[in-house]
Image (cartoon, grey):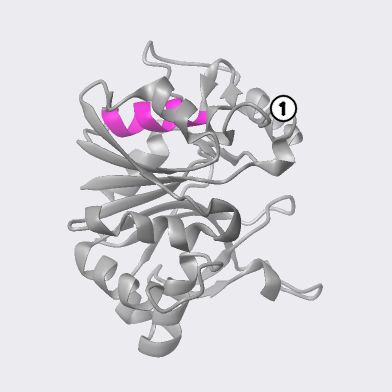
Amino acid sequence: MKAIILAAGEGTRLKPRTNNAPKCLTEINGISIMGNTLEILEKCKIKETIIVIRHLGNKIEGTFGDKYKSMKLVYEENSIWDKTNNIYSLLLAEKHMNEDILIIEADIFFEYRIMEKLLNSPFINAAVVDHYMSLLEGCVVSLSEDGLINKMYKKSEQLNDFDYSDKYKTVNLYKISKSLVNRMLCYIRNMDVNSFYEESFECIIKKEGYEKLFMKGVIVKGLKWIEIDTLDDIDMAEKVFKSKTDGNRIYK
């Protein structure tokens, strides 16, 4: 299994922090978002991680180089990052997607047990989700009785009367089998470059049925994670992750 980290965004809502450094190098209690992710992946024995970069991407390469401990690092550059969305960044990593993969967005600060739970799921396709809370924004999903994602709702579909009571927020951590990767790519190649890669999941659900997507929602209620988009998010994350545990600086 390989991991793909999407790190080509600018992080405009984190300015001035991101004027001179990419968003993923933002530190939470002394460890960067990217450093935390790489530490967790290496501890989970992932052998190769592909990082899609652009905005100040040379600083990411300069920080981590081509290896993180025993894990190989490979970089792909999104040269039109300001004209595309993450679906295009993911497509740039297509040549590396020849086996099962993890997809991780580079602005998620999370604890080790979340990745452990995702990898230990017996389902070959799985998405980390959490119970919806009012301050969260972005894609939400509903689950079938057997825990499979059966519908996805983009932010634009969540109007004023939207019912969140039975919805789950996606944490933007996915485990995807090689067979699903191939089906995703069939849709992604024909989608607008300003789309989000989750829209390929939505297409599979609508055109083939959620049973064909066969993606388990791995609920991580009570485990710690936060999406870092704003300066307030940094303050919140530093409070949530205030206590550190082992010497590897992995939050548990």
- Residue 246 image offset from top left, x and y in percent: 39, 14
Residue 144 visible at all? no
Q: Label 1 sits on what residue type? A: Asp
Against 67, residue 115 (above or below) is below
- Residue displayed at 40% across by 67% down: 147
Label 1 environment density (alpha carbons within 10 Å; few <14, some 14–19, many ≥20): few
- Residue 129 image offset from top left, x and y in percent: 49, 55
Give the farthest residue toward the front: 79
Give the farthest residue toward the bottom: 207
- Residue displayed at 34% across by 71% down: 184
In front of the other: 55 or 250: 55
- Residue 98 image offset from top left, x and y in percent: 18, 58
Instruction: Report whether 17 appears left or right of 167.
Output: right
- Residue 41 image offset from top left, x and y in percent: 31, 34
Q: Is residue 39 magenta?
A: yes
- Residue displayed at 59% across by 39% down: 226
Q: Dominant secondary structure of the magenta stretch? A: helix
In front of the other: 111 or 97: 97
Against 223, residue 164 (above or below) is below
Instruction: Report whether 163 appears left or right of 41.
Output: right
Instruction: Report whether 130 appears left or right of 173.
Output: right
Stretch of the chain drawn in magenta: 33-42
Q: Which residue is mark 1?
A: 235
Q: Secondary structure at mark 1?
A: helix
Give the farthest residue toward the right: 160
